[in-house]
């Protein structure tokens, strides 16, 4: 059994990049998330419905983008339970092409440190085609 | 039809308890590209001090969903779901969700605001465990587009 090492709060500096990752999404990813989450809004799997409501095409669930964007932080922290608070604003859609899919990129940086509480605020930059798709994406990670 | 400002402060009845299954946690974890063994393997979870596999940070949306359905179905709320866009989302945990938890969620309409012809409805769903202890508060801001 391997022990889980916890990143040391006092070894962090505001601005440090703690994790980076890219997630290639396909239409399959959206169907999988629909089933797992119970969100069966057809704009996430039917082009005709998406186009009828004026969208550029089938979109990734915002909650899928939110859910995957925290994963590099979970792996850095070593335990999903260390993420004690997580918030995002959904600012731009992520259209997922039926052939090409969509690649969502995540960069996680230290935004603030609260030594007394043992909390690091990790700020996420989440982009698709070089455009930010989540605003004010912040996680509070307990490192005690 | 526009959002009824009088729903601000309304507390909905608690939704029926949600029993967190281990396979559901795994299914959700795979769907959000989780790879951490604590999401999948009870032994890894126990080694880290948890009673069973730990749900990913956004899993609470699955429990919250039934409360949002109540809000959208409220006859006098005036929320046309075809005009609703998810604006913001937040999860604030007192402790992680683990397989075996029996969770009960209660929604309160925290605020209703108007902004440039749109309405912003902020809904706070407080999730407690079988002992009544707080687990997580899931907060959604829904943007309801006004009539064009």
Image (cartoon, rainbow, N blue to C red):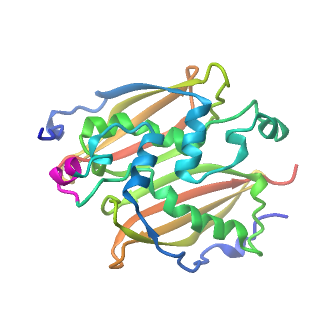
Say if A24 sits above or below A54 in the image.
above
Specify whether residue A27 is painted magenta. no
In the picture, the quarter occupied by the N terminus of chain A is: top left
* x, y percent for residue B46: 19, 54
* x, y percent for residue A138: 41, 43
Q: Which residues are magenta?
A: B43-50
Specify whether residue B44 is painted magenta. yes
* x, y percent for residue B55: 37, 53
Left or right: where B102 falls relative to A24: left
Residue at position x 28%, y 33% in the image:
A14
* x, y percent for residue A33: 55, 43
Foreground of the two, B129 or A10? B129
Q: Residue furthest front?
A: B23
Say if A10 sits above or below A87 in the image.
above
Residue at position x 59%, y 76% in the image:
B9
Residue at position x 58%, y 24% in the image:
A102
Q: Quadrant of residue B76?
A: bottom right
Left or right: where B78 falls relative to B57: right
């Amino acid at each position: 059994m391997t022990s889980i090492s916890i990143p040391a709060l006092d070894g962090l500096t505001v601005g440090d990049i703690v994790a980076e990752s890219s997630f290639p999404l396909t239409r399959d990813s959206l169907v999988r998330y629909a089933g797992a989450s119970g969100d069966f809004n057809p704009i996430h799997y039917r082009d005709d419905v998406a186009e009828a409501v004026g969208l550029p095409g089938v979109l990734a669930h915002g909650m899928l983008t939110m859910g995957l964007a925290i994963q590099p932080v979970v792996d850095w922290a070593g335990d999903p339970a260390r993420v004690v608070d997580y918030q995002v604003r959904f600012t731009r859609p992520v259209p997922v092409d039926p052939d090409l899919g969509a690649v969502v990129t995540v960069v996680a940086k230290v935004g603030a440190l609260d030594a007394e509480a043992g909390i690091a605020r990790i700020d996420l930059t989440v982009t698709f085609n070089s455009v930010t798709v989540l605003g004010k994406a912040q996680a509070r990670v307990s490192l005690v | 039809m526009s959002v009824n400002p009088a729903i601000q402060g309304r507390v909905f009845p608690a939704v029926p308890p949600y029993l967190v299954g281990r396979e559901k946690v795994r299914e959700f974890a795979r769907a959000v590209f989780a790879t951490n063994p604590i999401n999948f393997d009870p032994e890894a979870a126990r080694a880290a001090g948890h009673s069973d596999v730990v749900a990913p940070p956004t899993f609470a949306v699955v429990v919250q969903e039934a409360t949002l359905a109540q809000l959208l179905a409220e006859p006098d709320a005036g929320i046309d779901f075809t005009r609703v866009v998810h604006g913001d989302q937040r999860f604030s945990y007192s402790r992680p969700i683990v397989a075996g938890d029996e969770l009960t969620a209660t929604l309160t309409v925290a605020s209703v605001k108007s902004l440039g012809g749109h309405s912003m409805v902020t809904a706070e769903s407080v999730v407690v465990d079988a002992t009544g202890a707080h687990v997580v508060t899931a907060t959604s801001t829904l943007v309801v587009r006004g009539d064009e």
